[in-house]
Amino acid sequence: MKIRLTEHAKERANERRTTEGEVSMVLSSGQEAQLKKGRKSKEMVFDYNRNWLGKHYPQKKLKVVYAEEDDLMVVITIKVYYGEWR
């Protein structure tokens, strides 16, 4: 299935320091959760071990909100949470 990021999703990815590669990994292997209005989301935890806004975080959780249209996954927004999930 092909993936397309909306302009909003591209902006969020850039400002929240994630890559299209990570988004693709989440969509192919992340845990799924249903949302309202036919939208879906998947999330995945990545090792991070870097600073974000002056604080060190061992991991980041990437949540991708998307809709499916025929053979296309349209990424609507991307949320990134920094912390530790074990």
Image: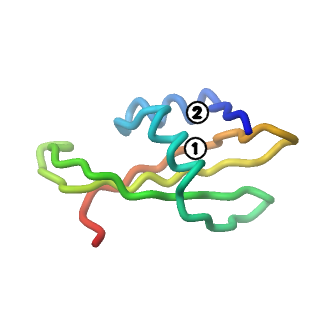
Q: Residues within 10 Å of mark 1 (few under 14, many from 20)?
A: some
- Determine which quarter of the picture holds residue 77: top right
Looking at the rendered structure, the kind of residue marked 2 is: His
The structure residue drawn at horizontal position 69% and vertical position 65%, both measured from the top left corner, is: 35
The structure residue drawn at horizontal position 45% and vertical position 57%, both measured from the top left corner, is: 44
> x, y (%) of residue 49?
17, 48
The residue identified by callout 2 is 8
The residue identified by callout 1 is 77
Q: Nearer the viewer, residue 15 or 21?
A: 21
Looking at the rendered structure, the kind of residue marked 1 is: Thr
Q: Is residue 53 left or right of residue 4?
A: left
> x, y (%) of residue 74?
71, 39
Q: How is the image coloured?
A: rainbow
CB atoms of marks 2 and 1 within 8 Å = yes
Quadrant of the frame with the N terminus: top right
Q: Earlier in the sequence, mark 2 or mark 1?
A: 2
Instruction: Say if 32 sits above or below 12 in the image.
Output: below
Q: Is residue 32 left or right of residue 45?
A: right
The structure residue drawn at horizontal position 47% and vertical position 34%, both measured from the top left corner, is: 21
The structure residue drawn at horizontal position 38% and vertical position 56%, both measured from the top left corner, is: 61
- Determine which quarter of the picture holds residue 15: top left
Q: Which mark is residue 54?
A: none
Q: Residues within 10 Å of mark 2 (few under 14, many from 20)?
A: few
Tell me the distance, in whole angstroms, between the alpha carbons under discs 2 and 1.
6 Å
> x, y (%) of residue 85?
30, 69
> x, y (%) of residue 5?
63, 32
